[in-house]
Image (cartoon, rainbow, N blue to C red):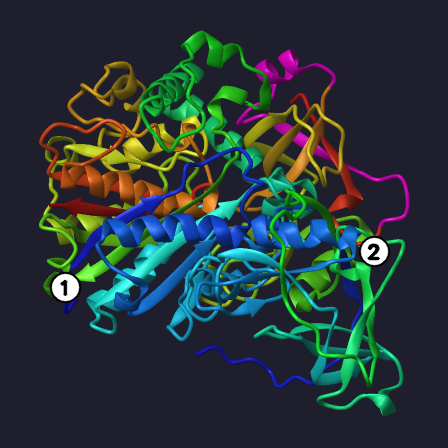
């Protein structure tokens, strides 16, 4: 439908972003008990009504969905059913003696010594509790006797929640439209959009196809540093990931010469003043950063209300 | 569509601020057990499964449907996950509906959940914004929603008092809801004087944050009889979107909801929604949204939502009760809410609602959606 010129891959600068989040995860009764028993150097499994034993413990049977019947202590010995090496670490599937399942863990040893069916035993890490990594890994134990599963009538109370964190780095490709817009912001301190096919107002962010008419967009246009608020709210709460300390105004602003809104901030001293004096229709101006522009919307430090 | 589709079994968890006794999968299991028991079925009777939940960043587990499949005994069944922000549960139900209506499945289990106590909510939601354009200034959905409301205040008269009335009504209704965990009556003044979070949104305009799951069994007409003599038929269901940065986007009416309503009303033969519906369930993550839904769903003309709520028409004893369950104000496990609203609507027309049964309810309207206004859907249910 749309004709695009032939293009070749180019190596262009990327936009770095990071999503970094803290969690309090809930393992549930079975996994929570397994983790709680790590400090006692016991490996806890679940026994199901059909006699199957699974370790680490699971609330429900993966084979028939039945809830677990009782906790058991499983042997710390077993065998390797599959393995690979990742960044110098050997990762293997371990099937503990008496268990129906296998689970991934480290093997501490030489890759040359590892084979399918190899007998292994758990080695504990003294510094770790409440984590499956309290088992440092499994070491080759050629002659380890085959262990047996035993009842565990009174296990530790399950751990209810565990702290966890994710930090995910990204390198986003700008593409030609964002690329030029941010180049213009960085190089010249101006916000540019593209015109629609049949009008003079610019779309921000710029794009190849107009969302309303589904036709290719037109030429580039510089928008003014001034604009009008369409909607806004006064942010009074703090939350993780916030880039500015409240209170401030979150505003959707249509720059003069544009037809779409951009999201930005307005600094305020007084909440009551802002409630009365900042709202839809209020005129604002972009205040650019004094420092070096990096090529992002944050190069506009804030907007401020103007009198006209 | 080939087959009529009915809700024949429902189940939800007792929602809570924080459940440390179960994992995400364990939470889902509770709702599934209840829905299957309610439908007089076992997992073996289910042909396909849809799992719906919010962004994976909420719970830090990718492909949670695999974990869920293990925990509910769905090994070997066709299963996939649907996600659509706050509308995840509703979108999941729509995906299940297509499977049964199209004849691909005789019975489909739809289970929806979120365990919001585990991760940072606003930050996770803010990642829905384009990384180049707006994410660094986003305040989850709340900042955006408050900005919409602020604009509607001037143009449509959606005052802080009118929104407070919505919160008061829904919180009062939630007291009778056995699955709600926020059960406290408040006054309009309490709401108006509560702490501003993103003004005009204040603390009591906002529902609690919850851990919860909800499940429904969808069945074709022929198989429905095994489960119940009185299924809740889906007379119409639709879910529409708009473009985030499009020009001409209205801050007033929710265009996607108006489009969905038009489509659904045509399918269900609705020409006068205010008169025809006996009961309405809507997903109101902020009290101001309910005012917008009244207008977008045609319960009143644009600009009259404040009068509608003030008149008492949407109260339990009004002519068009909205959220007899208490809506999100009683519990808000985001990804599950679309299914919770369907459950509340279905049990109304089945005559066995556990919160506040509306007498002789025959026709229910259910609304759900994600985002500030950009993903919206509705369904009509009848017994």
| Residue at x 13% of width, y 59% of height | B226
The label on residue A76 is none
* B189, A66: nearer the viewer: A66
Within 10 Å of disc 1 (Cα), the crowding (few <14, some 14-19, many 20+) is: some
| Residue at x 34% of width, y 27% of height | B326
Q: Tag 2's secondary structure?
A: helix
Residue highlighted by disc 1: B223
Q: Position of residue B337 (x, y in %)?
A: 40, 42
Question: Which picture quadrant has residue A76?
Answer: bottom right
Q: Position of residue A31 (x, y in %)?
A: 62, 55
| Residue B139 appears left or right of A183 | left
The label on residue A187 is 2
Q: Position of residue B100 (x, y in %)?
A: 23, 66
Residue A284 in magenta? yes
Pinpoint the chain carrying mark 2.
A
Within 10 Å of disc 2 (Cα), the crowding (few <14, some 14-19, many 20+) is: few
Q: Tag 1's secondary structure?
A: helix
Residue A106 in magenta? no
Q: Is residue B213 above or below residue A63?
A: above
Residue A55 visible in image? yes
Residue A200 visible in image? no
* A211, B289: nearer the viewer: B289
Pinpoint the chain carrying mark 1.
B
């Amino acid at each position: 439908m749309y004709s695009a010129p032939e293009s070749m891959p180019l190596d262009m600068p990327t936009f770095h972003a990071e999503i970094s989040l803290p969690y309090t995860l809930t393992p549930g009764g079975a996994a929570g008990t397994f983790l709680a028993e790590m400090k006692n150097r016991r490996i806890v499994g679940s026994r199901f009504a059909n006699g199957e034993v699974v370790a680490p413990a699971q609330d429900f049977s993966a084979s028939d969905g039945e809830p677990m019947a009782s906790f058991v202590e499983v042997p710390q010995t077993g065998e390797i059913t599959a393995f690979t090496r990742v960044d110098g670490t050997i990762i293997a599937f371990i099937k503990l003696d008496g268990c129906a399942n296998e689970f991934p863990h480290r093997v501490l040893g030489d890759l040359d010594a590892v084979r399918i069916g190899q007998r292994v035993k758990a080695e504990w890490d003294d510094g770790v509790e409440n984590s499956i990594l309290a088992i440092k890994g499994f070491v080759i134990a050629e002659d380890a006797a085959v262990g047996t599963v035993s009842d565990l009538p009174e296990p530790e109370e399950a751990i209810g929640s565990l702290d966890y964190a994710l930090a995910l780095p990204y390198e986003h490709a700008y593409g030609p439209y964002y690329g030029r817009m941010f180049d213009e912001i960085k190089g010249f301190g101006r916000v540019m959009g593209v015109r629609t096919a049949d009008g003079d107002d610019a779309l921000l962010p710029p794009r190849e196809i107009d969302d309303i008419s589904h036709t290719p967009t037109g030429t580039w246009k510089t928008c003014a540093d001034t604009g009008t608020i369409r909607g806004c709210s006064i942010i009074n709460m703090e939350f993780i990931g916030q880039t500015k300390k409240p209170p401030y105004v979150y505003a959707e602003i249509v720059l003069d010469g544009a037809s779409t809104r951009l999201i930005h901030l307005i600094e305020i001293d007084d909440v009551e003043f802002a409630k009365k004096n900042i709202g839809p229709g209020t005129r604002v101006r972009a205040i650019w950063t004094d420092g070096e522009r990096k090529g992002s919307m944050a190069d506009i430090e804030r907007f401020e209300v103007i009198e006209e | 569509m080939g087959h009529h589709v009915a809700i024949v079994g429902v189940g939800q968890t007792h929602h809570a601020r924080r459940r440390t006794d179960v994992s995400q999968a364990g939470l889902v299991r509770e709702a599934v057990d209840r829905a299957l028991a309610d439908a007089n079925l076992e997992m073996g009777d289910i042909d396909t499964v849809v799992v719906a939940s919010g962004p994976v960043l909420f719970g830090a587990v990718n492909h949670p449907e695999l974990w869920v499949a293990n925990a509910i005994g769905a090994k070997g069944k066709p299963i996939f996950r649907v996600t659509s922000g706050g509308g995840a549960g509703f979108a999941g139900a729509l995906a299940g509906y297509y499977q049964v209506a199209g004849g691909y499945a005789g019975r489909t289990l739809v289970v929806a959940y979120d365990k919001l106590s585990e991760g940072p909510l606003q930050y996770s939601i803010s990642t829905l914004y384009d990384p180049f354009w707006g994410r660094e200034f986003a305040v989850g959905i709340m900042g955006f929603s408050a900005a919409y409301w602020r604009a509607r205040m001037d143009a449509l008269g959606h005052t802080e008092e009118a929104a407070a009335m919505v919160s008061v009504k829904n919180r009062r209704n939630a007291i009778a809801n056995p699955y709600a965990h926020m059960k406290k009556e408040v006054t309009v003044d309490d709401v108006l004087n509560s702490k501003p979070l993103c003004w005009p949104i204040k603390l009591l305009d906002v529902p609690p944050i919850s851990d919860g799951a909800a499940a429904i069994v969808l069945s074709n007409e022929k198989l429905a009889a095994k489960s119940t003599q009185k299924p809740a038929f889906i007379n119409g269901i639709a879910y529409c979107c708009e473009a985030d940065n499009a020009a001409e986007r209205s801050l007033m009416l929710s265009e996607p909801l108006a489009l969905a309503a038009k489509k659904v009303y045509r399918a269900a033969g609705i020409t006068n929604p205010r008169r025809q519906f006996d009961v309405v369930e809507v997903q109101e993550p902020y009290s101001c949204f309910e005012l917008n839904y009244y207008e977008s769903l045609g319960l009143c003309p644009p600009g009259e939502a404040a009068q509608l709520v003030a008149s008492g028409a949407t109260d339990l004893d009004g002519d068009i009760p909205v959220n007899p369950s208490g809506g999100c104000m009683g519990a808000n496990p985001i990804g599950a809410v679309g299914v919770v609203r369907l459950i509340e609507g279905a049990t109304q027309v089945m005559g066995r609602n556990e919160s506040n049964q509306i007498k002789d309810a025959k026709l229910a309207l259910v609304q759900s959606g994600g985002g500030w206004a950009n993903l919206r859907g509705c369904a009509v249910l009848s017994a």
